[in-house]
Amino acid sequence: MKLLSLLVEPRLRGVDITGPQRLPLHQKILAEKKMIRAVFEEFYRTSLALEAKHFGSTTGLRVEIGAGTSFFKSLQPDLISTDLEASPHLDMVVDAQRMPFENESVRTLFCINAFHHFPEPRKFFSEVMRVVRPGGGCIIIDPAYGPVSDFLYRRLFSSEGYDRASTNWGYLPGADGQSLPNQALSFVVFIRDIEKLTREFPALELVEKDVLPSYLEYLLSGGLNFRQLVADWMQPGVRALETALHPFRRQLGLHHFVVLRKSASAPAS
């Protein structure tokens, strides 16, 4: 923990990284750190490619849930960028568990590093079933579940937990009676308990999942909360190493994606 405190981004010292004051600081950090911007841009482009692959000619709104400091909208201008907290760069304030959108009005819900922050995922899935059109769906990017991610996510953030054995689809009990988001939630729901998800929401099909390859760039960039560990000019070499290690991404990866599609035969909401 002492080493981690030394690696914390200086501008975030003493700042509650779960509070609204983090957003303008994170935006400034994201604008300045080329490597983490490249990682997020890869997340966005991967999400768009998966949308085109799996949701075909389905029409409707395209909505980013839990956007935070996202710049996804700069790549996809028709995207509705939303978060639970208001910010000048966002379009709407939206609770993912109680969305303001009309029934079957949405083509795609993009959810990048936000799913594990949902206290009651079943409410989110019910909302997906209500607002998404048949043939559309949800693309989720969240913490991965291999040995490296297991080691790191247990130690990086005191404001979040990581428990792959949790029997609860939701938050973990924390110190002082406070609940913590479970960074392993997407593993629990989409990997370990996938049969339960299918039973409870049979019209939601898990059509693709995989581990993303940009783990070294993400780690060495320091993300938004820690210092960058290498110079920007080293990024091409880091990416080349990731490419060489691609067969081992499931062991080394820090993020994975899940694509959920609402069955075209699902009854109308």
Image (cartoon, rainbow, N blue to C red):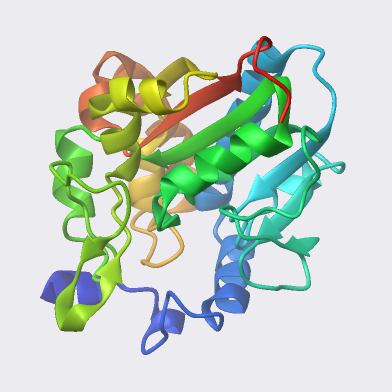
Residue 137, horizontal then vertical, whole percent:
63, 26
How many labels were placed on the picture? 0
Residue at 84% in and 31% down: 60
Position of 26 with respect to 55 (left or right) is: left
Q: State whether residue 213 is above or below residue 220.
A: above
Residue farthest to the bottom, as pictured: 14
Residue 47, horizontal then vertical, whole percent:
61, 30
Residue 81, horizontal then vertical, whole percent:
74, 53
Foreground: 227 or 152? 152
Foreground: 233 or 105? 105
Q: Taking the image as drawn, is residue 61 in sight?
A: yes
Q: State whether residue 211 is above or below residue 230.
A: above
The N terminus lies in quadrant: bottom left
Residue at 67% in and 46% down: 64
Choose top left, top right, bottom left or bottom right for residue 75: top right
The C terminus lies in quadrant: top right
Q: Taking the image as drawn, is residue 113 in sight?
A: no
Residue at 48% in and 33% down: 236
Position of 52 with respect to 206 (left or right) is: right
Residue at 43% in and 74% down: 18
Foreground: 88 or 182? 182
Choose top left, top right, bottom left or bottom right for residue 48: top right
Residue 107, horizontal then vertical, whole percent:
76, 29
